[in-house]
Image (cartoon, helix red, strand yellow):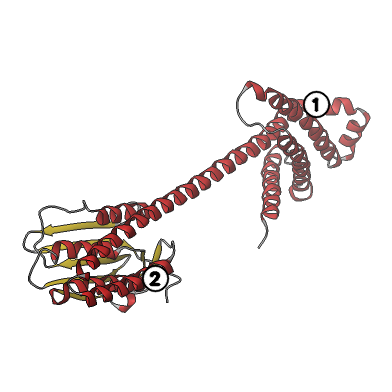
Amino acid sequence: MMNQRVRAWLFYWSIWGFLGVYMATMDEVMYPKMHFFTTIIPMNLAQNFAWGCAGLGVLWMARRWPIERFAWDEIKNWTIHLFGSVIIALIGLYMIWMIAIAFQDPSEMSKNVNDPEHGYFHFFKAYFHVNLLLMWAVLGAFHGLRIFERYRKREVEAAKLESQLATAQTQALQMQLQPHFLFNTLNSIAALIHSDSNAADRMVSRLADLLRMTLDSGTRQQISLRQEMAFTDAYLGIEGIRFQDRLTVTKDVPAECLDAAVPAFLLQPLVENAIKHGVADMATPSTIEIRARHEPPWLTLEVLDNGRGVNGNRKSGIGTQNTAARLQLMYKDRHTFSLLSTPGNGTRALVQIPWSVEPTAK
């Protein structure tokens, strides 16, 4: 592939070449007696090559004394550009005149050679303003592209900063979730120490496994659903010790969904919420169901319980608040998160995010 500098040179000279062909069609109309392919085309291409060389002088001047803004402290550069473009236009016009003489018939060439001042003055009156306008066009194009590049660079930097801020905010929310979960688990262990020391010991072991998995995931914002399910299973193992036969967990997660990318620590707060409102307040056995399905272009996740349910849409807890905030930061408006609860019919948490496959999934 051609590098950027080569492409820029090709683009620059192709513009002058196209302009030369365009001007040749104008000369064909103005001078029908001149041969188009042997005289008009070569002459105009040569003249536009000379214009292109003059344009290089304008570009050098623009780089050497760039114009940053419309302000009095830029008056020096504006003045240099004004007079410099006039001088370059005069030099370029003289080169173009010499090329025009070279393509004239012998009689016209003899007149211009014998009286160059008259010939050049006539040429000057006819073409100087066009020549100067072309030099200003080169100058304007250079500064226009320069402003555009600076604007695009600022946009890229702004997008990068926004992404870094969103990542930092997401990490902060994730860090807030982990102490919240750990505090609740330690409370459960403390409650079991005196009543069932063996269960407390198993819970500590499960907690160590879960914390190891948390450390292994590091600060990654996304992991595979397989990893997230393993983390959730470890958490449910802890809660299973606490509630024993009162808690039944069913999972409907197709194999095709296991490599899907999901926000780290997504399901645990939803499962914890289901246990808090669907199991902890009930003396009878309760069921929690975890579902996943691929509905192009979405990955849909659900956590359902058959608990008592509550009135309204519950998003007031730390876990659910943080889940909603993290999803908004990561996916903006391209996601769905609802937590609906009906008295007597349990609670249904629904998350819908864009489908993608975690590249590091195993």
Image point (33%, 63%), residue name: 265
Q: Residue furthest right?
A: 114
Q: Nearer the viewer, residue 356 or 135?
A: 356
Mark 2 is surrounded, within 10 Å at the Cα level, by few (under 14), some (14 to 19) or many (20 or more) other residues, namely few
Residue type beneath disc 2:
Arg
Dot 1 or dot 2: first in sequence order is 1
Mark 1 is surrounded, within 10 Å at the Cα level, by few (under 14), some (14 to 19) or many (20 or more) other residues, namely few
Q: Residue furthest top?
A: 72
Residue 251 in view of the camera: no
Q: Indicate which disc residue 212 carries.
A: 2
Q: Which of 133 and 267 is in front in this view?
A: 267
Gap in angstroms between the C-alphas marked 1 and 2 = 88 Å
Residue 116 in the image, given as x and y percentages of width and height: 89, 29
Looking at the rendering, in which quadrant would you find the N terminus? Answer: bottom right
Looking at the rendering, in which quadrant would you find the C terminus? Answer: bottom left
Q: Nearer the viewer, residue 330 or 343?
A: 343
Indicate the quadrant where residue 151 lies: top right
Q: Residue furthest front?
A: 194
Q: Indicate which disc residue 122 carries.
A: 1
Image point (88%, 31%), residue name: 112
Residue type beneath disc 1:
His
Residue 103 in the image, given as x and y percentages of width and height: 83, 42
Residue 220, placed above or below residue 4: below
Residue 98 in the image, given as x and y percentages of width and height: 85, 37
**What is the number of callouts on the image?**
2
Q: Nearer the viewer, residue 85 or 175?
A: 175
User: Helix or strand or loop: what does disc 1 sit on?
Assistant: helix
Say left or right for 209 vs 218: left
User: Helix or strand or loop: what does disc 2 sit on?
Assistant: helix
Residue 116 in view of the camera: yes
Residue 106, placed above or below residue 345: above
